[in-house]
Image: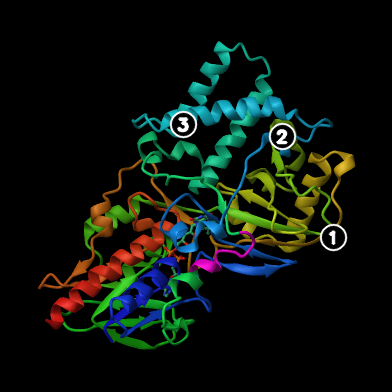
Amino acid sequence: MKVIIIGAGAAGVAAASRLFQSGVTDFKILEAENRIGGRIHTMKFGNAMIDLGAQWCHGHNIVYDLVGKENLEEAIMDFRKMTYSNGSKELIDFRVCSFLFQLLFKIEENIKSKNGNESVENYFTRIYYEELQKLDYKNKALAKEILDNFLKRESCYCASNNMNEISIDNFNKYKDCDGPTWLSYKGVGLKRILDLLTRYEFSLDNKVLFNKRVINIDYSNDGKITVKCADGSEFLCDHVICTVSLGVLKLNHLKLFTPQLPANKVKALNALKFGAIGKVFIEFERQFWSDDWLGLTLLWNEGNIKKIKGKYDWLDAIYCIYNFKYYPNILIAFMGGNKVEIVEKLSTEKIKEGIEFVMKNFLPDEIKSTQIVNVKQTTWKTNENFLGTYSYHAIENVCMKSLQEPLFDKQKKIKVAFAGEAFHEDYFSTVHGAVETGYRAADEIAKQICKSKL
Ligand SMILES: Cc1cc2nc3c(=O)[nH]c(=O)nc-3n(C[C@H](O)[C@H](O)[C@H](O)COP(=O)(O)OP(=O)(O)OC[C@H]3O[C@@H](n4cnc5c(N)ncnc54)[C@H](O)[C@@H]3O)c2cc1C
């Protein structure tokens, strides 16, 4: 076989489609799970097609072009449509919250022109309180609750444990694409991208082998590469495109590669971080909210954290419970930080109890929830084929060149190329980043195969 692609996520499927377009058809994809998509996982839950993994298209990028603007819809952030609560009797006035959040968004806009090693958390805290002091802002308790919520939200966007882990320089490594940041797929789910990537004449059905967890890639001699799977099967090929997550690479690279990866690549692998966020989908007996309600922002403080201590210690990882207009009767709780793994291991009953606690304590009586029918939490961190959700650049500098560089043979021919979100220098942590790296790896290999035919 000419090429083996390891992993059928966005990068692997993109690489396959590009190989095919370049006339390289002698390839297979080995996938450890029993489905394609990887961190794109659209499934039926209640009456909706929910996305356990990626959910949004972030701006005008390769995915946007693929999907087409008519199939995407901008999510509008309107502070008036959000409920803010810290669990006290009265809801907090959206105007006060909006004022404080706007201030933080302005600081976020400005951070893009800054540089340095100061942590993002430090920077936000410092500038925010300086600004509030200038304005002689009095409600210190609320100001802190909003700052904490904002920082939790940011660590969820980055998948970091907290924003102290990320320096300003590394925060700015991620590049926004032009256009709206939050574009939804109108309830169809991200599976649409996979269908579009494979819309050419070839079908993935006879290209992907499922339940094939690769345990070793032996590229030690200048001939064929041997790829071994956990079920004992072996494959020979000329080139490998490895798209497993950074989490899988970090944990397994010593056993996965023969010979071992060069020291500079391992150093880069270690410097780049791989974190986890979590979602809990909550299905209610009936929709107790209006269609245009955005959701509930949870403001945690010493008082309400005391109330969950010992019983629902994980609950304060949730910073917001969103209404997504295409999910009837379903709300989604979002969480980040180091409690995500704890939530992944909880039983459905325990999660239900915790969410009920939030509904009872954070919402006023007149909009109390109806019965919760079902809950479903994501399990990206504890799944051995992912070990987290996406990568982030923390404080340490990552040498991207060492990370991205393929493994060559003595004739400088590519033996193993790497692709996947973590390998993108600007768009790491996204689907569009993963797709671009898949195309890139396939192009390099196709070029080499075509050259050797001449
Ligand atoms: C909860 C969550 C929310 C997200 N939200 C967004 C969003 O809104 N917008 C956005 O753009 N991005 C989002 N992302 C990120 C996005 O999903 C990823 O960046 C992208 O899908 C990664 O694709 P990939 O091909 O690099 O990796 P993966 O999708 O992880 O593909 C790698 C594949 O390799 C397989 N594999 C692993 N180990 C082995 C092995 N040993 N042998 C064989 N196969 C193996 C895996 O099963 C997997 O299918 C989100 C991710 C998560 C988890």
**43 relative position to 270: left or right:** right
Q: Is residue 336 visible?
A: yes
Q: Is residue 431 visible?
A: no
**86 relative position to 423: left or right:** right
Mark 1 or 3: the one toward you: 3
Quadrant position of the C terminus in the picture: bottom left
Does residue 190 belong to the magenta stretch? yes
Q: Which residue is labeled 1 in the image? A: 285
Q: Residue sitting at 36 percent across and 61 percent down?
A: 436
Mark positioned earlier in the residue sequence (1 or 3): 3
Q: Which residue is labeled 2 in the image? A: 80
Instruction: Tell me the amino acid under the disc marked 3.
Output: Glu
Mark positioned earlier in the residue sequence (3 or 2): 2
Residue 35: percent from the left, percent from the top?
A: 53, 77
Q: Nearer the viewer, residue 296 or 145?
A: 296
Q: Give SS at disc 3.
A: helix
Mark 2 or 1: the one toward you: 2
Q: How far apart are the alpha carbons under marks 1 and 3?
A: 41 Å
Q: Residue sitting at 51 percent across and 46 percent down?
A: 181
Q: How far apart are the alpha carbons under marks 2 and 1?
A: 26 Å
Q: Are marks 2 and 1 in contact (CB under 8 Å)?
A: no
Q: Which residue is labeled 3 in the image? A: 109
Q: From which residue to which does the magenta span run?
A: 186-193
